[in-house]
């Protein structure tokens, strides 16, 4: 075992990522309101869709079935909130710890390695995202928008979405020069949120459907919708695979970037 | 009377295994060579110093020793281990006080110690026990629940040192630990470091303050432009590269060069600096009366003991802090 680990460069050895998470638990003990507030944004969206937009739009036809608009949008909002939570945690907060608070420099002077930092941060974003997803699903159930026990499968799906976006966010943050680059994040997320077959089905895009498929969120939305409807098809494997591949690649690159940046 | 054991036990105290060994160590950043091939050994229990101006390569060397910066070429061993292979195992046994504080500003003073201890895989109860001890040591017990941001510079420095000791390190690395502190805070820190030395902790320090190096170091190297230019104890270096005393003369602005010529031949050597003229002599008072005899009328004159700053000046022809 130890000889195997010695061959792997230290950049990619993951041994104590949970220590980073432990640090965040202690740090956020005093700031639980900040964590709590992240739950409300998607909730307000959902309520506005249900109360207003849903009446105007009526039912939507997806996969040969007709569903009310709020039942169509709710899984997409859940997927979007998983994305938002993951990106929020892995960009601004990470930038602060990386460049200004220099928390990672301190961590890397201990037995912690770059991959411990990267995996720990992404793990924390995931945990936080799961808390929101559970809350959101509970609200959906309360409003009668869940269709069966299969809806619970939306939770691991949201974890996967969180993993994907936290990895991308973390990787992107290692390239940021300062706070002004955070604007890029917001600019990039808006179209993802609007055009990932979130508010209208992919069929509405006509010949431009392939562009939508480039969005990682589109694959996430497809998975959450399938989970909520309890309809499982082979194409879901492809959607899941896309997210897994993006996550792994971004994670490996992110560990290497931490190594390059902080262990020069 | 064990004849088998005696050769080993006789050899051990006189030449203990060095804790740090570097041979031909270099560090390059994008074509710039910050460290240009240095050799050194640090023995257990020693207080070792790197003295040199900014940009001499001290911090780059320290970062390599701390196993957070890969060696560009040459060999480096700590505890007989290679940082490239056993970085995490080495880091588990050392404490680092970085040049700039990297304290966690979102945590309280004692949480900083707890969490850092957890990074070393210490059990929670052990972290708490040691944190209490270390806060006592750093004279921060009454600030245990304070937010780090509200601490003074000296307190932050002491907390950084306390944090670096959480894993009970065998080797402590201090990168300019007192830069930016007021004199009183420096003396408090020095006293704490001296206590650690008495407890047998090996310490490696970088500084550009000669008084700090003279106070603390058993042995030191002077670095300049990525190279080691001298090595020895502070006293040895002063004896080797300087005279017993130094006469400092200040003249009216703009007349230093002309006075330098007037003083030629007095003492061992003269050094004309922008603000004063130094005369190196074993007897400073005699040198001063000789200067007066030659007609020099300095605005002020001071005879003092030679210091490491003079060593540096002799070695490089430049002042240490500029």
Image: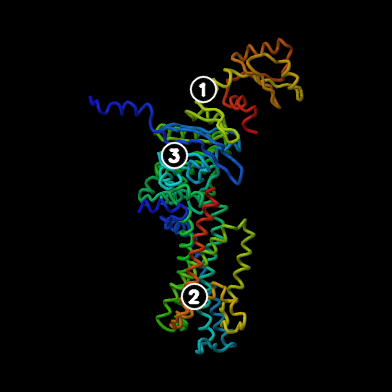
Question: Which of the marked residues, 1 or 3, is nearer the chain's N terminus?
Answer: 3
Residue A140 % position (x, y): 47, 79
**Tag 1–tag 3 contact (CB < 8 Å):** no
Q: Which residue is mark 3?
A: B77
Indicate how the structure is coloured in the image: rainbow
- Residue B163 relative to residue A42: left or right: left
Question: Is the same chain shared between marks 2 and 1?
Answer: no
Q: SS at mark 2? A: helix
Question: Who's the residue at 38% across and 51% down the image?
Answer: B121
Question: Who's the residue at 47% across and 80% down the image?
Answer: A226
- Residue B165 relative to residue B149: left or right: left
Q: Which residue is mark 2?
A: A239
Residue A60 % position (x, y): 55, 87
| Subunit ID for the residue under disc 1 | B
User: Label 2 to label 1, Cα distance in Å?
Assistant: 72 Å
Q: Quadrant of residue A190?
A: bottom right
Residue B236, numbered label: 1
Crowd tier of the residue under label 2, counting other residues whose Cα lies within 10 Å: few below 14, some 14–19, many 20 or above: some
User: Label 2 to label 3, Cα distance in Å?
Assistant: 49 Å
| Subunit ID for the residue under disc 2 | A
Question: Can you name the residue that lies furthest to the top here?
Answer: B293
| Subunit ID for the residue under disc 3 | B
């Amino acid at each position: 075992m130890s000889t195997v680990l010695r061959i792997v460069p230290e950049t990619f050895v993951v041994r104590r990522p949970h220590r980073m998470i432990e640090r965040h638990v202690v740090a956020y003990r005093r700031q639980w309101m900040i964590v709590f507030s992240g739950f409300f944004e998607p909730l307000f969206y959902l309520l506005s869709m249900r109360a207003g937009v849903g009446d105007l739009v009526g039912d939507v036809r997806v996969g040969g079935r007709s569903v009310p608009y709020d039942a169509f949008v709710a899984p997409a909002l859940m997927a979007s909130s998983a994305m938002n939570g993951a990106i929020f945690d892995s960009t601004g907060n990470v930038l602060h710890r990386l460049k200004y608070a220099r928390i990672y420099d301190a961590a890397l002077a201990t037995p912690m390695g770059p991959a411990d930092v990267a995996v720990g941060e992404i793990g924390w974003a995931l945990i936080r995202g799961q808390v929101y997803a559970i809350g959101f699903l509970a609200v959906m159930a309360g409003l009668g928008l869940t269709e069966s026990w299969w809806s619970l499968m939306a939770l691991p799906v949201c974890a996967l979405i969180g993993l994907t976006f936290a990895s991308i966010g973390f990787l992107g943050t290692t390239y940021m020069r300062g706070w002004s680059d955070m604007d890029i994040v917001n600019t990039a997320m808006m179209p993802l949120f609007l055009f990932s077959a979130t508010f209208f089905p992919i069929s509405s895009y006509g010949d431009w459907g392939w562009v939508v498929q480039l969005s990682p969120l589109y694959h996430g939305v497809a998975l959450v919708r399938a989970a909520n409807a309890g309809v499982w098809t082979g194409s879901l494997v492809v959607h899941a695979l896309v997210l897994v591949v993006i996550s792994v690649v971004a994670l490996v690159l992110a560990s290497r970037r931490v190594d390059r940046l902080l262990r020069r | 009377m064990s004849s088998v054991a005696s050769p080993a036990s006789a050899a051990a105290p006189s030449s203990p295994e060095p804790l740090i060994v570097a041979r031909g160590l270099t560090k390059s950043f994008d074509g710039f060579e910050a460290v240009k091939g240095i050799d050194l050994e640090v023995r257990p229990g020693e207080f070792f110093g790197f003295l040199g101006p900014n940009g001499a390569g001290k911090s780059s060397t320290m970062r390599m020793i701390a196993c957070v910066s890969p060696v560009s070429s040459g060999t480096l061993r700590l505890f007989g281990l290679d940082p490239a292979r056993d970085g995490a195992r080495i880091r588990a046994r050392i404490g680092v006080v970085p040049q700039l504080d990297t304290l966690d500003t979102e945590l309280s003073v004692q949480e900083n110690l707890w969490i850092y201890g957890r990074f070393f895989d210490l059990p929670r109860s052990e972290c708490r026990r040691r944190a209490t001890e270390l806060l006592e040591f750093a004279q921060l017990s009454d600030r245990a629940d304070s937010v780090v941001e509200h601490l003074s510079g000296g307190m932050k420095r002491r907390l950084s040192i306390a944090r670096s000791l959480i894993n009970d390190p065998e080797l402590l690395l201090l990168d300019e630990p007192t830069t930016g502190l007021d004199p009183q805070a420096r003396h408090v820190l020095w006293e704490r470091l001296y206590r650690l030395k008495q407890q047998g902790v090996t310490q490696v320090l970088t500084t550009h303050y000669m008084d700090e190096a003279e106070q603390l170091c058993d042995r030191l190297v002077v670095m300049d432009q990525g190279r080691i230019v001298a090595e020895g104890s502070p006293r040895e270096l002063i004896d080797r590269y300087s005279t017993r005393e130094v006469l400092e003369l200040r003249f009216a602005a703009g007349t230093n060069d002309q006075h330098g010529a007037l003083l030629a031949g007095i003492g061992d050597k003269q050094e004309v600096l922008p603000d004063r003229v130094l005369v190196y002599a074993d007897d400073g008072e005699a040198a001063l009366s000789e200067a007066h005899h030659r007609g020099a009328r300095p605005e002020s004159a001071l005879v003092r003991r030679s210091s490491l700053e003079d060593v540096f000046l002799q070695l490089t022809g430049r002042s240490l802090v500029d």
